Image: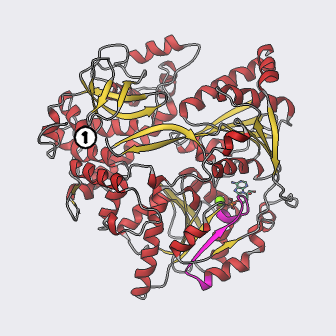
Amino acid sequence: TVNLDMHVKNKFNYTLSTSRNIPPASKRNCIGQQSKSLPVFNCRQRILKEIEINDTVLIMSETGSGKTTQIPQFLLHAGYAKSSMICITQPRRVAAITVARRVAQELSSNIGDIVGYTVRFEDVTTKNTKIRYLTDGVLLRESIEDRLLLKYSVIILDEAHERTVNADLLFGIVKEAQKERSRKNIPNLKVVITSATMDIDHFGKYFKCKGLYLEGRTHPVRVMHAKEPHDDYVHAILVTLFHIHRTEPINHDVLIFLTGQDEIESLAQQIRKLAKINTNGPTNIRVYTLYAQLSHSMQLECFLPGPSNMRKVVLATNIAETSITIPGIRCVIDCGFVKEKFFNSVDGIDILKAVRISRAQAWQRTGRAGRDAPGVCYRAYTKSEMDSFLSSTQPEILRANPTSTVLQLLAMDIDCNNFDFLDAPLDEALISAYRSLDGLGAIEYGPISHITPLGRLMSQYPLDPKYSKLLTSASKFGCMEEILRLVSVLSSDNIFVSSNDKNELATLAHAKFHSKHGDHLTLLNVYNLFIKAEKPKVWCHDNFLNYRCLIYARNVCRQLSEISLRLGLTINSSENIESFKKCLLSGFFENVAILQKDGSYLTCSGHLKAKMHPSSVFHLKYKPKCILFTQMVQTDSNFLRQVTDVFIDWAKEVVPCLKNGIK
Ligand code: ADP
Ligand code: MG
């Protein structure tokens, strides 16, 4: 404690920057009254009128004004869901689930009845459902089968400013569906685009419609900036949290924005430990974590009311940035970074790195503190640092790997070159995507590219094409079961738990699973033993493994197996390691790197220099000549994560278009 106090004095160093001048909302008692006091409620008639007159309407208002939860209800009551449904897309599943639950509660109905949700791997709707919340990925997938989106009378594309690739594709698809429906005399499709911060001019030109600005009325949030830049923001955040803990009432809960799972889990551990030391008794801080790779039920825990004499502290990635309301949050601490994937079109490889958030994102995060009462936001960056942030987030379609996009469009018989993009991906990125898909056997590349039957199968999986390729070719290699398990574990991120004080024990425990062939077979070893364990939770604890991630993987595995069976693929199994590796290579032939004289690796096209990630079983041991990796992470240099040794000559055999081998 002494130590911490010292740090608090030294490091708790903020200046008040601004106070958003928003009048406080009137007292809110029950849920019904609460929604009537929301800003959008006063504009109800205006909103309905605009939607009645126009086919497409843009609605912009501050976060917390009631767009996501109220507008669908207005439409329901105005009779828009008589014969077909109203749907609302969300960029993330946790938002879709929690908002749907909230609206069901407001309508005093059970979830899945009038109000339901559909997210990847979970559908909670019935034939009674009139309002359906879904992720933009799910709607996109539906549109492959149903281009006219006939199930819906109104589609609300929410949080438009997030500009996920899926949302960007949906913008073009709903526009096209509107045209086609009016051409075929089918009742028209109403489209509503909503956001707190979108670029109305840009969207207005694209949709040829005007925007509706609604007056906001969230609660005031005091904004505090760090006085000086921090090199160690995690430490600064820890100190800030304990300052809040000593000065703010115990029912003021805290939401902390961090970049990813590892950072979140390690800070969670530190907070729990310090909270214990600090109180000399039962701890009065309850730590929750919220990131994409947690299972649904773990993600939803922080939304439940905590014990009354404890402070709730939620450590989250940017998945808590929009849409959701975590009850009780009055303080936000923002690290100012976000982890994003960037695409290197020369190598066809995705690189994961933490970058500065945009100013729009900073304000979204700040807004999380004023959802149900006035709040405060601590920014672990200075005001002048913030001035150098981009004003809004770059659309994902301009930086992400477009391979999946291209394949999805081709599955709808749309050529990217003819698609009406709000912002089109870069040409070189598209060309690289077409080449990759050609290599994967998903398309026949040419002046006009065609999707192959294999490509159609691949487009049925909600996965990156490299992974779908593994699944569609695994039966042929005889190792479908193994690949299903591996892909599931890879989609759940880091299953290995590290622990600062028991690091040696953890390393020893993990070493038991090591395979001399590399990390993929190591992961498979873990999974195989996990599903056999009698008491899986205890087993995970004893072996320093993340139980939640493995449960998530088991769920994904079940779903992927179902899809595979539906596609008529055979689920076979083999212990032949060479076939398993060849199968890996059939999907990840672009992610191959060759050992250099200085001990580093060069990616196969020779453009990126990288090192073995310290988490690899090969780290500090034997360095294979040629490796395949499934992830590249960039910090001060490039690191290859999840590595298996392969023979370069196999490439010619498993990737027909590489007749001359990899360059
Ligand atoms: P917007 O989409 O405009 O940001 P929402 O419709 O999501 O606004 O939320 C409006 C208000 O409803 C919030 O400010 C909050 O007070 C309340 N609210 C929404 N969801 C929940 C929830 N799950 N629990 C408690 N309050 C909520
Ligand atoms: Mg919203």
Which quadrant holds the N terminus?
A: top right
- Residue 163 coordinates in the image, percent (x, y): 52, 57
Q: Is residue 576 visible?
A: no
Mark 1, Cα crowd under 10 Å, few <14 / some 14-19 / many 20+, is many
**Residue type, numbered disc 1:** Met
Q: Residue at x 39, y 56 (%)?
A: 426
- How many dots with numbers? 1
Position of residue 592 relative to residue 180, above or below, is above
Position of residue 36 relative to residue 624, above or below, is below
- Please tell me whether mark 1 sits on a helix, a strand or a loop: helix
Q: Residue at x 22, y 55 (%)?
A: 454
Residue segment shown in magenta: 52-69
Q: Residue at x 68, y 32 (%)?
A: 287
- Residue 181 coordinates in the image, percent (x, y): 43, 82
State which quadrant residue 11 falls in: top right
Q: Is residue 583 visible?
A: yes
Could you say which is closer to the camera, residue 456 or residue 29?
A: 456
Instruction: Please say which color scheme the image uses.
Output: secondary structure
Position of residue 108 relative to residue 610, above or below, is below
For label 1, the residue is 480
Quadrant location of ligand 2? bottom right
User: For this view, does 572 lie left or right of residue 257?
Assistant: left
Could you say which is closer to the camera, residue 305 or residue 178?
A: 178
- Residue 526 coordinates in the image, percent (x, y): 38, 26
- Residue 235 coordinates in the image, percent (x, y): 68, 25
